[in-house]
Amino acid sequence: MDVSKYKSLYLQETGEHISGIEAGLLAIEKTPGDSFALDNLFRHYHSIKGMSASMGYNPIMQLAHAQEDLLDKLRSGKLGVTSAMTSLLLKCLDAMKALVERVRADEPLDTDSSSLIEALKSCASGKEPLAPEPSAAPSAPVEGGHKLRLSSVMKVEGSVFDGLLASVGDLFMALSSFKALTHGTRSVEFKNGVHQIGKTINSLHESIISARMLPLEDLTAGLPRLVRDLANETGKNVALHTEGMDISLDRSILEGLGGPLVHIIRNAVDHGIEPTAERVQSGKPLPASIRIKASTRKDRVVIEISDDGRGMNRQKLKARAISSGIPAAKIEAMPDREVLKLVCLPGLSTAETVTSTSGRGVGMDVVKDAVEGFGGSLEIESTEYRGTKIILELPRTSSITKALLVETGGELFLVPISRIEKVIEVPSNELDAGTYAFAGAEIPLVELAASLGIKTGPRFSRTLIVLDASGTLSGTEGKTLAGLVVDDFGDEIDAYVKPLLPPMSRLRSAAGITVLGDGRPVFLLDIPQIILKALERA
Amino acid sequence: MPKKVLIADDTEFFRVALKDILTGGGYEVVGEATNGAEAVEMASSLKPDLVILDVVMPGKNGLEAAREISALKLPIKIVMCTSLGYEPIVEEAIRSGASGYIIKPLSETKVLNTLNSII
Amino acid sequence: MEGDKLVIALGNGKYALDTKTVAGIIELQKLPFLPGKSGFVAGVVSFRNEPVTVIDLKAALGEAIDTPEAGHKIIVLGSKGRLLGIDIGPSQVSFIWNEELRGRTTDEKRLFTSGRIYAADGPVDIIDWQALFNETARLLTTD
């Protein structure tokens, strides 16, 4: 059999079976006699064995075969499921995953699985499994089990969609030049034509976007296993609850979310959740809980990861920040939410001991950078003895953002439409007070030019953009508003927003950049950051 | 006229591989079922000359499907397909109405020889 | 040090860039604003639909900034996906070809330069644009 042409199919289906095995093993761990789960598990191993044999991947075939034999005994009731068995099977799964990765990477399958196979055989013959020598365990992959992976339901290379999306971005840019021309023409045919093209590009864009969307579920399916392993490692008793995992996100964002999510959960298990004895003593419920809750806010998704552990220790955080060189006066003047964010400074963590899971030198700084890297924001809430909540707000789709062109001091910027509540023309003198009466409340005003250091001349009237500032002001459950003052506003455009690349990748006030039809580069403002910065100064 | 074959295997990998082998060997693959129940249904509606049934499939397995297909009393030959280590099943398969068997891993000559000897 | 050089007469000095790193030259009247700019960072332009951070070369190299300059001439440098625009104002450019370089280069380094060419009409410092790029990234790290 000419195997090369079947390799991608092999990898795809093996991947699906491996996910099935992962879910199945966790199911039988909970309900050992679950015959449906046992039947399915048997079939997954059986299929992997058959495919691997056909492809000539003998080490995978042998390992799958030994597991299949054990499952055959379990599903026929000749043996009962024990927790040692599921642990062994999970270990074998990691080894199998590692081998499949080697197939993917065209590396030789020369790892030795014999100790695992021996352990499986002794298990199938009715003996309690001898724990396989850890050193002999094939590449007992350091992080093999702890990676979140997407199922490959998309049978088209992701890069194809990236290319399509980039082309649509170019179309949008070309369209914006035509739209600019329609202002100067009376030709109804031309205006109609441009309008039609616009509609077509929009629907093309929507189809591509929806083809790229995947549910959060695809990413989080691996989390129960992660939590189980972390809990076992640390001897803690933890349960994971999820909600809203049917919300779908662009594949690229979902992929980028994997690392940060694993890290946050590791932190929660390692540092947040107390050892079982401590929880018992303080009368806290067992198992401890980690909750992931997703919800939508306009075109964005909010993902909250909360634990009911001991919460963050602000004094320790402050002390660490001071010892890392931040002036004490500056720290003392910080609002509470900023103090909590000190945990995102490189190398800062309040954990007393370095554990195998979280103490790896990468910390919340990496999480924050990653989340901000795809246009998201991170907030922390924490109450001592009650727990910590990390709130990630992310765009659901990447690249094309509806945005309003605004002008101040002769410079153009973009404000995402998703943040805009209202745009009002206001005589300049009504804005002098620094706040503005809107919808029965005094909202704080931010002068964009001053915030960015742009010179402006006096004007009779200004444009006030009332913004949804949720997630940027402390103590916000409901809607918080703020006003952004600019000189004027222009068209609403579909901007193909590119991420900021070095050397400007760490700009605080901008979330991205786009190039207009006339070649002018325009920054998409990072509204939460601009409001925060202005309020910090005030 | 090429002989019409129905393939039943829950694994796309094997369906694709079998189809390649069969098409190359002058057979026409008229349908692909992914489980036993689908196989029975497609056998009765498509009336192929031959059905290749994988033994391990979700829901209704290959043996059960073989029994039901032979009960249809149609001129359909049945070939079982199974993995190494399941030879004892073959005997049961023959009792269930199968005319032959293929042992995985698949090889082109093995598959075509088996089929040619049956049809 | 090998390879054809683009030479910029800037203030009292002369500076060289490898021609193979030059992706293009843009001329424009007004440089769009870059929020958070500081030091010698001047603004942003687009080059073939890609945004490019622009620095003021005179300010970076410590050459006296004489008159407020009319117009900007921006040399876009690129390699391995990194892009940087350097604004040379109204300065003139010329070339030194590889064969003219032989035996005339030294590795004397100054701020943001990586070597020196003793050309027939005086010394030319070779710009180390990767160092400029790194310093630009540092200047734009606001936190």
Image (cartoon, coloured by chain):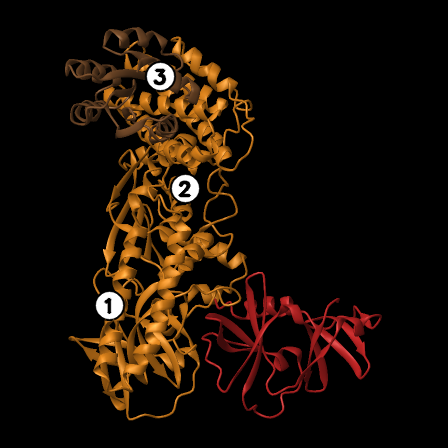
Chain colours: A orange, B brown, C red
Residue ID for mark 3: B116
Residue ID for mark 2: A266
SS for dot 3: helix
Q: Residue at x 32, y 52 (%)?
A: A212
Mark 1 or mark 3, which is nearer to you? 3
Q: Residue at x 32, y 9 (%)?
A: B90
In space, the residues marked 1 and 2 are separated at their CA atoms by 46 Å
For this view, does A207 lie left or right of residue C139? left
Residue ID for mark 1: A199
Residue A11: give x, y in percent of width and height. 42, 34
Q: Which residue lies most toward the right here? A: C103
Q: Residue at x 29, y 29 (%)?
A: B29
Residue A66: give x, y in percent of width and height. 42, 17
- Front residue of A13/A197: it is A197
Q: Residue at x 54, y 76 (%)?
A: C54
SS for dot 2: helix
In space, the residues marked 1 and 3 are separated at their CA atoms by 58 Å
On screen, A302 above or below B5?
below
Assess whether mark 2 and mark 1 are in contact (beta carbons under 8 angstroms): no
**In terms of image quadrants, where is residue A525?**
bottom left
Chain that bears disc 3: B
Upstream in the sequence, badge 1 or badge 2?
A: 1
Assess whether mark 3 and mark 1 are in contact (beta carbons under 8 angstroms): no
